Image (cartoon, rainbow, N blue to C red):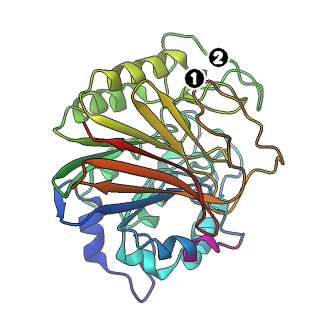
Amino acid sequence: MCIRDRPNYRPALFLLIISLSNAVYSDPFKIAFGSCLDQDRPQPIWSTIQRDEVNAFIFLGDNVYGDDDSSGELDTLRAAYSKQKLKLPSWLNEKEIYSIWDDHDYGENDGGSLYKGKKESQELFLNFWGIPNNDQRHNQEGVYFDHEFTTDGVKVHLIALDTRYFRSELDGGFRSYKINNNDEATILGTSQWSWLNETIKKDADLIILMTSIQLLATNHAYEKWSLFPNERKKMLELIDTLDTTTIVLSGDRHRAGIYKYNDIYEITASALNRPSSRKSSNETDPLLLHEMYIKENYGLMLIDGINQEVKFSLKDIKGNLINTKTIQIK
């Protein structure tokens, strides 16, 4: 992963992590996941996550806080990455790491396709995470990718989306965004949609879909897929065509919750160390299964091939269970 300068860094691990070749595991596979990790704040949650003895960690965006302004000057982002490299625990070097970005490691708060620094920001992102030079992400616009592995006979397809690079401009101001019904408005952009429509057809028993902003939530004032209802509808219809168990992971919100739409579950895990400044967890949404959790948290997923099930949980900074759900793999 990105912490290449650490004594325990093992380059070979990254070839396994990021390559698109199939990896095979024989034991139940544990994946922890989270978002919103401020390099200027303490990170005690890592010792809790370490006790879960996970196989992999998914970073769901805002992995540093380096956004400055819309100028495209990236000094703040570079400094944030430099500091974060020293903060991440060394035990992560021995785990598989999958990462996407959100606005604060993209470079502009709530930024989208018009951000001037996005190309250089992508280079910084890929270099920080140690993505090999022959990886497709060095030759494409955007940081989207997919990865396949097998655990206990379960074929897992991890699909990571980029909700920043191509996203159309937001309509309205911060905390008062308006729905954009323009048929040409997009989150993923033409090239990423074309890639996704083909990639999602790969043979799999379980799809884990990574999106930095929430897909299912509709009833809050911040960024979300539902600000672009045509894009959200297109994504939900695509997932509905699949005969594959699909779980969505998201971050961004500085609070955590589990959502359900038809057979689709979404787990929002946020924040690792930068929780909501708002004191109330009183957020309602027709698809929200439980009350939102507003303190430090992370997600944990256990893929159990023997029982053909997936258990996903939200846990607090001490490892206490917040909410959990177990579903059968189709």
Residue at the spot 42% in from the left edge and 89% down from the top edge:
7
Residue 251 pos. (x, y %): 56, 46
Name the side, left or right, on which 54 lies relative to 292. left
Q: In the rendering, at what x and y percent does residue 325 appear? A: 46, 45
Image quarter hosting the C terminus: top left
Disc 1 designates what residue?
A: 226
Q: Position of residue 111 (x, y in %)?
A: 62, 38
Report which quarter residue 82 is drawn in: bottom right
What numbered label is drawn on residue 234?
none
The relative height of residue 143 versus residue 234 in the rendered view (above or below) is below
Labels 1 & 2 near each other (Cβ < 8 A): yes
The image quarter in which residue 77 lies: bottom right
Q: Which residues are magenta?
A: 42-47
In the picture, measured across the screen, residue 194 lies left or right of residue 168, that is left
Residue at 36 percent across and 71 percent down: it is 95
Q: Position of residue 220 (x, y in %)?
A: 70, 29
Disc 2 on helix, strand or loop?
loop
Q: Toward the viewer: 62 or 239?
A: 239
Query: The residue under label 1 is which amino acid type?
Result: Ser
Residue 193 falls within the magenta-colored stretch: no
In front: label 1 or label 2 = 1
Most extreme residue toward the right is: 279
Upstream in sequence: badge 1 or badge 2 = 2
How many C-alpha atoms fall within 10 Å of the one at disc 1: few (<14), some, or many (≥20)? many
